[in-house]
Image: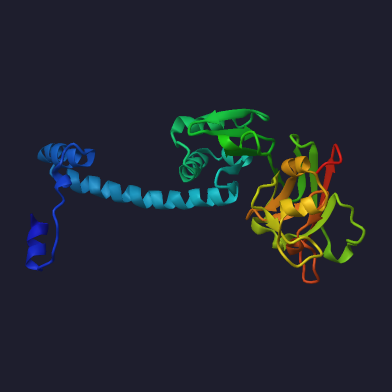
Amino acid sequence: AKIIDWLNSEKIQFRIDSSNSDTHYSRNFIRHEIMSVISKYEPLAVERMTSLANQMQNTWGIVAAQINKWVARSVIKLSVKSFIVKKAALEEGEIAVEGLRAVFEKYGIPAHLKNIENVLKCRNRTGGNFLLPGRWHFQVAKQNVLFAEDSLKKEEFLCVIPVPGTAECRKKGISFTVTELDCECIDITGTDRWSAFVDMDSVGGQTLVYRKIRFGDNFVPLGRNHTTSVLKFLAKQGYSKNIREEAGVVVDGNDRVVWIPGVRMSSDNSVKKTTGRIIKIVSRALSDNI
């Protein structure tokens, strides 16, 4: 009533929302029914609960900042339907729980505590493939956990490549080894097609991922100056439709193509005179397929 009197005295237009008095809504039931009864026994109840709510809001502001940092360093976005979480980050207690909750909500995965606890419980079951509600599933690898929508389950393969380090993609029978090099002491001439020298500063997110080629993938082939479709490029190179449909590419943290192992790397990531950091990626395949 005091607020309405003040608005009227200041000639400020307002509208009374009839839903504010509808006690079918929990917020109104608490405000009109429960709080009024509590206030009869404890006149300062409302003030104390308001103070507590403000303290909780301030505390959550601090926690939210830590959650955002956890997500930034622990989650790698692959597409709107898939992402990777670093396995080591799942060992970080309640921050990992709230971090997963935030990521699940972003991707539309039901963020119930039991779903998050299921991920934490299965995080060390390397090689396992587990279901989540909402047509999602997660696969546990040595260093990472891949989350993907079920529509990707049969067609996708995804493998995070540590920099530096070694990774295996068992589904494709291929491994990758990444080493950092001294810019002044290397010779990049005569590189075979299963090796690539990359300007690391040009790699988005300082992250490398090996995944299946997608229809919209484009890149600038080394030696050329225009963008082309990866699939069309492979076709012009003489690779069959069957190989093109199963081929993989190395992409960066922004999902841009860096290298087609065994074929060609992107000119955007090639070593130049101004390059400050160089990495060498070596892949080994079980067969002469890409």
In screen coordinates, is 133 left or right of 192? left
Vertical position of residue 45 compared to residue 114: above or below: below
Tally of numbered discs: 0
Question: What's the colour scheme?
Answer: rainbow
Say which residue appears at 52% left-offset and 38% top-offset: 93
Relative image position of residue 130 (x, y in whole percent):
58, 28
Residue 103, visible in the rendered structure = yes
User: Would you say residue 180 is visible in this rendering?
Assistant: no
- Apparent side of residue 3 relative to residue 257 in the rendered image (left or right): left
2 vs 156, nearest the viewer:
156
Q: Residue 43: x and y, percent?
A: 12, 44
Is 94 in front, or is 204? 204
Vertical order, 17 against 189 (above or below): above
**Would residue 39 appear left or right of 133 to someone viewing this image?**
left
User: Is 280 drawn above or below residue 240 in the view shown?
Assistant: below
Question: Quadrant of residue 245 in the image?
Answer: top right
Q: Is residue 20 left or right of residue 239?
A: left
Which residue is found at the position 67% from the left and 56% from the top?
256
Quarter the N terminus occupies: bottom left
Q: Is residue 254 above or below residue 183?
A: above
For the point 60% across and 42% down, the residue is 85
Which residue is at the front of the view, 260 or 28? Answer: 260
Where residue 236 sits: x, y (%)? 80, 54
Residue 105 on image: x %, y %: 45, 43
Quadrant for residue 180, please give it.
bottom right
Going 56% across and 34% down the picture, which residue do you hit?
150
Give the quarter of the figure containing the C terminus: top right
Given the current orientation, which residue lies at the most extreme right position?
A: 190
